Image: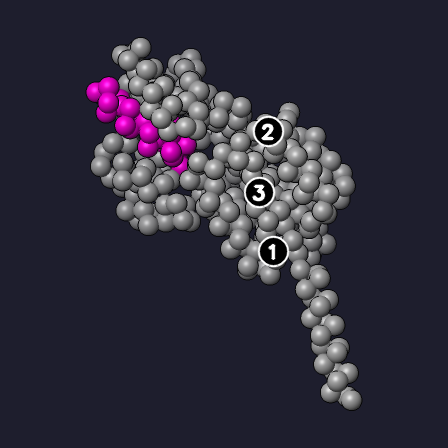
Amino acid sequence: MKKLIATAMATALLAGVAMAQERYVVITHTQGTDPFWPVVEKGARDAAEAVGATIEYNFDASGDMAGMAKLIEAAAATQPDGIVVSLPDAAALGPAIKSASDSGVPVITINSGLESSKEVGALMHVGQPEYDAGKAAGDRAKEEGVTTGLCLNQEAFNTALVDRCTGYFEGIGQDLNMIDVSNDVTQIETRTAAALQADESIDGVLAVGPHVCEAAVKAIADVGADVHLACFDLSPGVMDMIEAGQAAFTIDQQQRLQGYMPIIALHLYNNSAGLLPGANIPSGPGFVDKSNAAAVKELAGVDR
């Protein structure tokens, strides 16, 4: 009888532990074509495993901001222990995030939207200062001989990508010259080639996403242009391009940290009386070029 009671108590205890398991929802902007986000998702899942939580990872496959806002609203309605969300368009997503926060769900923004994070009700932001990252890329491009630039933006709605382009042109000392290339590889190649053919003075190209950079190098080769190519983020293809001398460098924002750190921060917040870092966490920028590409190549697309 005592053994039966003890077994029942143990079962009840285990059930209580299971019911108490933390659940976090991660929502990002993407069309499912960018190799950047699987690394973020992996970081979030690694962190959840470390603290014994569960993760739900969602994105709107169309890349539509209204669809993403609905995902945030749906997640908040389930009252998870926290929401981690990218913020590429504060006007479109801000009301849904603020509503989630007001309902008692702690929110941390990642990647895009550093400047708007607090005003939409988030606890903090994990990501790189995008304008500063673009400015660093432009400063270096100018040092390496670029005089006339072109910035390839795959998400015209994304304020973070606009900030990268704006910073780049501030660095090289020019007015903004940015084109919308979309996330479609064929269109990226076509639009990049057309822009280079239309202005032969362009001697520097910044691609603000890894898949954009991989497509851009093909367009550059197709038109026979001699340009300095700089990228954002890591992928196996970009690493090969850097080693082959087809790209000068890429900006590393360490996206695994953008998935990993918010889950750890939310776990501490929920279990340690609101414990939080005293400031936002900048995950970048850092440069990867020929001098250090070999050291991180195996991590590209996995943990970097």
Q: Nearer the viewer, residue 3 or 87?
A: 3
Upstream in the sequence, badge 2 or badge 1? 1
Q: Work out how far the residue at label 1 is from the one at label 3, CA to CA, in angstroms.
A: 13 Å
Give the residue pinned by disc 1.
54
Residue range of the region highlighted in magenta in the rendering: 206-233
**Any part of residue 241 in sight:** yes
How far across and how far down the image is residue 229, in percent? 30, 27
Q: Quadrant of the N terminus?
A: bottom right
Specify few, some or many for label 3: CA neighbours under 10 Å numbering under 14, 14-19, or 20 or more.
some
Left or right: 251 as drawn, with respect to 105: left
In the figure, 199 relative to 41: above or below?
A: above
In the figure, 260 relative to 199: above or below?
A: below
Which element carries disc 1, helix, strand or loop?
Answer: strand
Give the residue pinned by disc 3.
58
Residue at 36% across / 45% down in the picture?
A: 300
How far across and how far down the image is residue 274, in percent? 70, 50
Specify few, some or many for label 2: CA neighbours under 10 Å numbering under 14, 14-19, or 20 or more.
many
Which element carries disc 3, helix, strand or loop?
Answer: strand
Which element carries disc 2, helix, strand or loop?
Answer: helix
Tell me whether circle 1 and circle 3 mark residues in contact (CB < 8 Å). no
What kind of residue is marked 1? Answer: Thr
In the figure, 299 relative to 191: above or below?
A: below
Left or right: 120 as drawn, with respect to 233: right
Mark identifier at residue 65: 2
Residue at 48% across / 50% down in the picture?
A: 42
How far across and how far down the image is residue 160, in percent? 51, 28
In the figure, 264 relative to 88: above or below?
A: below
Q: Work out how far the residue at label 2 is from the one at label 1, CA to CA, in angstroms.
A: 25 Å
What kind of residue is marked 3? Answer: Asn
